[in-house]
Image: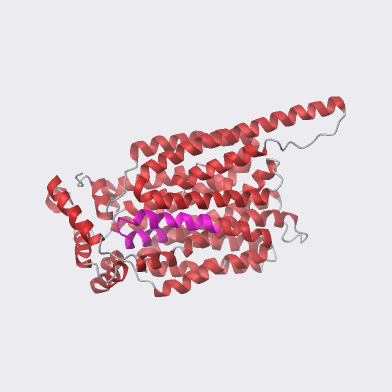
Amino acid sequence: MDNDGETRPLLVNDEERSEDRSEQDSYLNKVKNGKLYMAASAAVLGPLSFGFVLGYSSPAIPELTRIQDPKLQLSTEEASWFGSVVTIGAALGGLLGGWVVEKIGRKLSLMFCAIPFIFGFTIIVAAQNHWMLYVGRVLTGLASGVTSLVVPLYISEMAHERVRGTIGSCVQLMVVTGIMGAYITGLFLDWRWLAVASSIPPTLMLVFMCFMPETPRFLLSQGKRREAEEALRFLRGPDAPTQWEFARIEEAYQNEEQSFSLSDLKDPGVYKPLGVGIMMMVFQQLTGINAIMFYAETIFEQAHFKSSDVATVIVAATQVVFTAVAAFVMDRAGRKVLLILSGVTMCVSEVVFGVYFKLTVMKHDNSTLLSALTDAPQAPQTDLAWLAVGSMGLFITGFALGWGPTPWLIMSEIFPTRARGLGSALCVLTNWTCAFIVTKTFQNLMDLISSAGTFWMFSALCALNVIFTAMFVPETKGKTLEEIQAHFKGTYVR
C-alpha cells in the first residue's frame, strides 16, 4: 500500500504542525469536561467491580479454609484454585469482549458485563459446595475480562488528548480502590456478606450507563454520523466547536480500511502495536503483582507478621494513593518515564523481599539448631517483619506508578479502529492467561525454588521490562489517537 498516495501524513512539516497545534489548543480551551467526567465515572464502576473480584479472595480464603462445613471447607490446593480460577474466566471474557465490543458497541458491552458480575456474586452467596464457589468466581472473572477490555476503549474514544492519560489511569485507580474496598469490608463482614457488598458496584454501573452516550468513533464506524456528532457535543460541552474535532476523526476514519482481515497483520500499523500491547501485558503479569495481591495475607502470615489482614489493607491503601499520583502526573510526566521508574522500583523491592525471606530461613535454621542444643523453646521471629512490609510497600508503590495503569492505557490508545476489538482482545487474553499461570504456580514456585528465589526471579523479569520499555514502547502523551496510529505506520512527522 502506498501511504503517500492513499493517506496524507497528519503533519507534514514544522509550519503545518505548529499551525495545527495552535488550532487544537484553541479548540481544547473551549471544551468543558463536566459530562466527559460524568460518563467516565459511570464507566469506571466496572473496574471498581473488577477490583472487588480480585480482592475478594484474600479475606475469603482464610475463612473458607477454617469453616466447619466440609462441603465448603477448602484445602490448600482448592484454595489455590479459588484464588486463580477467576483468571480463567477473565481470559475467556477478554475473547468474548473483543467480539461483543465490535458487535453491540462500547456502552452496551459495559451494561452487558454487569450481569455476570451480579450473577457470579449471587452464586457465591448461595454456595452449598465447592463447585458453586468456583462457578461464581469464573462468572465474576468473565465479567472482569470484558470490563478490562471495554472500559479503557470507551474512555480512550471519549476523552481528548489533554485528559486521556489522567482519565485512562482512573481505570487502574478504581481497580485498586475495589481491592482495598474488599480488604476493608472483609475485616467486618464474613465471606457471604462480602459477596453481597461486592455486587453493589456492578449494579450501580448497569443503572448509570443507561444515561451515558456511545462513543463518537464507534457510532461513526456504524454509519451513524448524526448520532456521533450529538455524542461528541454532549462530551465536549456547548461552547466547543465540535465540527473541527469531528472532521479530524472522520478524515482518519475515511483514510483507514473499514474492516479487518488477516492480511492486515502485514501492516506495521497493526502488527507493531499488537506486539507492543501483548508484550506489555506479559511483562505486567511477570512482575508477580497478581500472585502477590491474591496471596497478600498468606505472604504476611509466612513473614510472621502479627496482623496480616491489617497489613494487606495498608498495602492496598498504598496502591490506591500511588495509582492516584500516577493518574495525576500521567499527562505531565509521560508514559515511558513512569514505566521505567516503576520497573526499577519493583526490581529493587523484590530483591529486598527475597533477601528478607532468605534471612528469615537462615535465622529460623539457626534458632532451631540452638533450640535443639539447649533444649530451650523456640520463639517466633518477628523482628524482621518491618522488612517484609517495607519491601511489599515499595513494590506496590512502584507498580502503581507505572506498570499498573499504563499498559491498559496504552492498549486503548495504540490500535487502529478496525483492529481495536481484536487487538485489545488478544492483549486481555494474554494478560489473564499469564495471570492464571503466575497465580496458579506461585505457591509451587515458592516450594520449588524457595520464597527468596521466587522473588529474585520476578526481580530479574522487572529488569527486562525496563529494557523493553526503553527500546520499544512509544510515548503517547499529548497525541491524538490518530497521531499515535500514524506513528506506527510511519506517516507521523515530528
207 displayed left or right of 313: left
29 displayed left or right of 428: left
Residue that appears at 33% across and 53% down: 413
Residue that appears at 30% across and 52% down: 262
Residue that appears at 65% across and 67% down: 125
Point out the stretch of residues depicted in magenta. Answer: 150-178
**Number of marks drawn:** 0
Q: Can residue 164 be found in the magenta stretch?
A: yes
Name the spot of residue 400 as percent of width and height, x first: 48, 47
Q: How is the image coloured?
A: secondary structure
Q: Can residue 20 be found in the magenta stretch?
A: no
Residue 289 to residue 470: above or below: below
Q: Main secondary structure of the magenta part?
A: helix
Name the spot of residue 470 as percent of width and height, x first: 36, 37
Name the spot of residue 292 as percent of width and height, x first: 58, 45
130 displayed left or right of 103: right
State whether residue 458 appears in this view: yes
Residue lying farthest to the top in this orientation: 373
116 displayed left or right of 221: right
Name the one closer to the observer, 281 or 151. Answer: 151
Name the spot of residue 264 as percent of width and height, x first: 27, 51
Name the one closer to the observer, 467 or 159. Answer: 159
Residue 227 to residue 15: above or below: below
State whether residue 334 appears in this view: no
Task: Give the quarter of the figure containing the C terminus.
Answer: top left
